[in-house]
């Protein structure tokens, strides 16, 4: 009599455990199928404290002469930018033409030099250069010391 | 495979550019529009934390002047006001002296110095003897069989500036060409004239104290090229120079 009962318990237990495991697996699969949560872009969410009404700037309304001046200035700017763009395009076109002419003359001279010239220059890219600043670097300048602590939040999907 | 000798001699020349170190001054329209944009941004903005603090403190001061203030209110406040902070920052800014945009070399118009005209491109010109004339040219040497034109141009650069120059050559292809015929006296069937191929490079190292300069040299901007180069040569060179 003692022997039969433990055996039954084991079978039932094993079956119960297997059923539990399957249920857990099904739940995991359902969770994985759901789309991953989007990482919020912190720049696009304005914190609520900045939309309070006492924060609104109080300035005198815009005079009509001022509005007129602004519109005319923007029109002048439009024209200025158009001229600048045209000049740039013209300069680039002249550059390309000059290069094409040089390559044509080179081809007339010697085919092998021409082939060497139109080969791709592997060492050219990636090309890095520091842009110009407003004032030249001050020789012997000792910048003040400071510590930078990074507090960006890292999200994991 | 040069079976028949071509009548043109080949030269490789290098246009070495020192790129600008400071920004160019803004045009009048650019300044006006920049001011307008700042004004519009100010009008559309809300008060920042610092400005709120400043406004509150101004109100407190006003209340102090007008009526007798509570001792309790004043006890818990900080000693430093926003206005004092702003003054402190202003003082610190005034103490800093930046390097001048117009250098000594600009004032003395020393055209051999690299510190001149920091807001524009500077090109290297050297004095070379062509035929029996001493001319100001972009550094050039004659092509030798067995090398590409780019290596000729690099050799030209090394001849005049020494081996320790760090320059980034912009590609294998020439940027421009100047073709000229020799004067009749020395022109022959096999030696009609010369073709000078120009290559462009950016100067990477900023100090050339190590360079052994072998001839008279100048660093000039695009506008000043006209003072030194001949008109035909100048026309061809100007085509591939962006200002």
Image (tube, coloured by chain):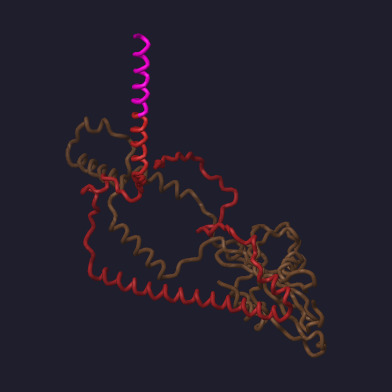
Q: Residue at 21% of width from left, 39% of height from top?
A: B64
Residue A14 shown in magenta = yes
| A114 vs B203: above or below | below
- The N terminus of chain B appears in which quarter of the rendering? bottom right
- Say which residue appears at 25% left-offset and 33% top-offset: B74
Q: The red chain is which one?
A: A
Residue B136 appears anywhere in the view:
yes
Residue A123 higher or lower than A99, as above or below? above
Q: Is residue B172 left or right of residue A84?
A: right
Closer to the camera, B41 or A106?
A: A106
Can residue B110 be spotted in the picture? no
Does B163 sit left or right of A20 as displayed?
right
Residue B115: % across, % down: 62, 62
Q: Color used for chain B?
A: brown
From the viewer's perspective, tell me whether residue B154 is left or right of residue A24. right
**In the displayed image of the protein, which residue is found farthest to the bottom?**
B184
In front of the other: A123 or A77 = A123
In magenta, the rendered stretch is A1-18
> Who's the residue at 77% across and 73% down the image?
B143
Q: In this view, does B151 lie to the left or right of A89?
A: right
Q: Is residue B150 magenta?
A: no
Q: Main secondary structure of the magenta part?
A: helix
Residue B37 locus on image (x, y percent): 35, 63
Q: In which quarter of the view is residue B215 placed?
A: bottom right
């Amino acid at each position: 009599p003692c022997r039969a009962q433990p055996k039954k318990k084991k079978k039932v237990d094993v079956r119960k455990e297997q059923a539990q495991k399957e249920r857990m697996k099904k739940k995991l699969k359902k969770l994985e199928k759901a789309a991953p949560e989007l990482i919020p872009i912190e720049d696009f969410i304005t914190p609520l404290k900045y939309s309070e009404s006492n924060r609104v700037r109080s300035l005198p309304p815009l005079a009509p002469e001022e509005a007129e001046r602004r519109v005319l200035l923007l029109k002048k700017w439009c024209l200025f930018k158009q001229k600048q763009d045209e000049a740039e395009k013209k300069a680039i076109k002249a550059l390309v033409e000059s290069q094409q002419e040089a390559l044509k003359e080179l081809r007339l001279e010697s085919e092998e030099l021409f082939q060497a010239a139109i080969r791709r220059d592997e060492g050219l890219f990636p090309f890095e250069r520091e842009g110009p600043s407003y004032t030249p670097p001050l020789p012997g300048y000792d910048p003040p010391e400071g510590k930078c602590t990074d507090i960006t939040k890292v999200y994991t999907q | 495979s040069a079976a028949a000798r071509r009548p043109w001699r080949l030269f490789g020349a290098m246009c070495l550019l020192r790129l600008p170190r400071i920004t160019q001054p803004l045009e009048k329209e650019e300044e006006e529009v920049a001011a307008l944009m700042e004004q519009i941004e100010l009008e559309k903005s809300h008060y920042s934390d610092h400005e709120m603090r400043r406004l509150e403190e101004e109100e407190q001061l006003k209340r102090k002047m007008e009526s007798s203030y509570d001792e309790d209110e004043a006890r818990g406040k900080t000693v430093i006001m926003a206005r004092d902070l702003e003054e402190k920052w202003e003082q610190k800014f005034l103490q800093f002296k930046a390097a001048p945009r117009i250098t000594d070399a600009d004032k003395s118009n020393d055209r051999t110095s690299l510190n001149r005209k920091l807001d524009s491109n500077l090109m290297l010109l050297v004095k070379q003897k062509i035929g029996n004339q001493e001319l100001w040219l972009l550094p050039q040497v004659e092509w030798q069989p067995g090398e590409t034109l780019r290596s000729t141009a690099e050799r030209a650069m090394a001849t005049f500036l020494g081996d320790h120059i760090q320059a980034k050559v912009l590609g294998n292809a020439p940027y421009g060409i100047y073709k000229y015929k020799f004067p009749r006296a020395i022109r022959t069937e096999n030696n009609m004239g010369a073709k000078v191929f120009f290559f462009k490079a950016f100067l990477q190292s900023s100090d050339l104290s190590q360079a052994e300069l072998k001839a008279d040299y100048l660093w000039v901007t695009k506008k000043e090229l006209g003072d030194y180069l001949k008109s035909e040569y100048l026309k061809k060179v100007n085509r591939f120079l962006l200002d």
